[in-house]
Image: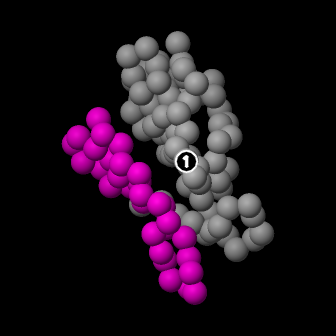
Amino acid sequence: MLSTPRTFAGFQKRIWGRDAVRRFTECGVDLVLSGHTRVPGMTLFDGDDQTTVLISAGTLSDRTREDQASFNRLILKSDEATLIRYGFEDGAAVRLETTRIAK
């Protein structure tokens, strides 16, 4: 049974493909990377025996959007993952948010 997703502060709260994420969680998938929505976010989905992390990238597009242009850097280690979201100020990349996920 998939619980209500735990969405981190500052991230988009909409979840697309809930049925797909449920199936990924049931199959033991640890991490799903998505970029089609162009809305940055990270959500944890808790299953019976598994937690699946869904990470959605932002966009580098300068079109008018609710969220500022951004990109993600994902650092994977054996016991944790770190997601760093970057945006732009005066043409330079700046760190907007860092989230660590322990295994």
> Which residue is at the far right?
64
Residue drawn where x is 55% and y is 39% of the image: 7
Q: Is residue 1 left or right of residue 61?
A: left
Q: Whole-percent x and y of residue 75?
A: 33, 55
State the residue position of label 1: 9
- Please tell me whether the stretch drawn in magenta is mainly helix, strand or loop: strand
Residue drawn where x is 43% and y is 14% of the image: 48
When the figure is inspected, residue 66 is found, relative to residue 95, above or below; the finding is above
Q: Whole-percent x and y of residue 103?
A: 29, 35
Q: Whole-percent x and y of residue 9?
A: 55, 47
Mark 1 residue crowding within 10 angstroms, few (<14) / some (14–19) / many (20+): few
Q: Which amino acid, mark 1? A: Ala
> Which residues, given as a range, are shown in magenta?
74-103
> Which residue is at the far front?
9
Q: Is residue 16 left or right of residue 46?
A: right
Q: Where is residue 40, by image quadrant?
A: bottom right
Q: Kindly tell me whether residue 4 is visible in this rendering.
A: yes
Q: How many marks?
A: 1
Q: Whole-percent x and y of residue 53?
A: 45, 37
Label 1: element kind: loop
Q: Kindly tell me whether residue 36 is visible in this rendering.
A: no
Q: Where is residue 84, by image quadrant?
A: bottom left
Q: Is residue 102 magenta?
A: yes
When the figure is inspected, residue 92 is found, relative to residue 22, above or below; the finding is below
